[in-house]
Image (cartoon, rainbow, N blue to C red):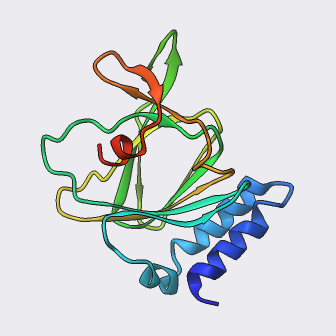
Amino acid sequence: MNATEEFVAQCSAAVKEDRGAGATREVVERAVRDRCLIEELPLEAGVTVLHSAEALTILHVVMAERPVGTGKPIPHNHLMWALIGVMHGSEENEFFRRSEHTIEPSGSGRVIAEGQVLMMGDNTVHSVKNPSSDRLSSALHVYGGNLLAAEKTMWCEPDWTEQPFDFFRVIGS
């Protein structure tokens, strides 16, 4: 079994525990420091589905450098708990809360650096970007459900209206 298969197996077992999200977080915390796994996953911009099932989705997300002056990332939800574990570079998350028929910023956001893990709850609305203009970022994105089948939404400028989730707009934003 290679490092990726072992990681998926460990997450699949952890998510079934009584404290599934917490147990899975512990697996992701170990994984972001696992040199074998890090070296096994390609460092090429894009999203790779490592696992997708009813109770668990695991993505390897590699974000390209963000050119200066590019548009804002698109806020979106997942409708399930989520973990982001950064393996290369960093990811910048901005958080939002619902307000009437729109969203508004909530807090100051958070940059997750190499080796760190961020946990988000079922109702989290966030946007994510690679804050670097000269380095790729690579992270494991782990979700407590079937992310690919969930009816997620996103909020678009200029008036931050809620719309059905469009994977290419969110990832390509």
Query: Where is residue 15 shown, x and y percent of the image?
Result: 76, 60
Question: Is residue 65 shown above or below 92?
Answer: below
Q: Is the N terminus in the top left, top right, bottom left or bottom right quadrant?
A: bottom right
Report how many numbered discs are placed on residues in the image: 0
Confirm whether residue 106 shows in the render. Answer: no
Rendered residue at 60%/73% (across/down): 30
Question: x%, y% of residue 90?
Answer: 36, 59
Residue furthest to the right in view is 18
Taking the image as shown, residue 123 lies to the left or right of residue 162, namely right
Q: With respect to residue 119, does 151 lie above or below?
A: above
- The answer to whether residue 151 shows anywhere in this view is yes
x%, y% of residue 67? 15, 51
Image position of 125 with respect to 98: above or below: below
Q: Is residue 124 left or right of residue 9?
A: left
Residue at image coords 59%, 36%? 151
Q: Quadrant of residue 75?
A: top left
- Front residue of this view, candidates 137 and 44: 44
Query: In the picture, which quadrant includes the C terminus?
Result: top left
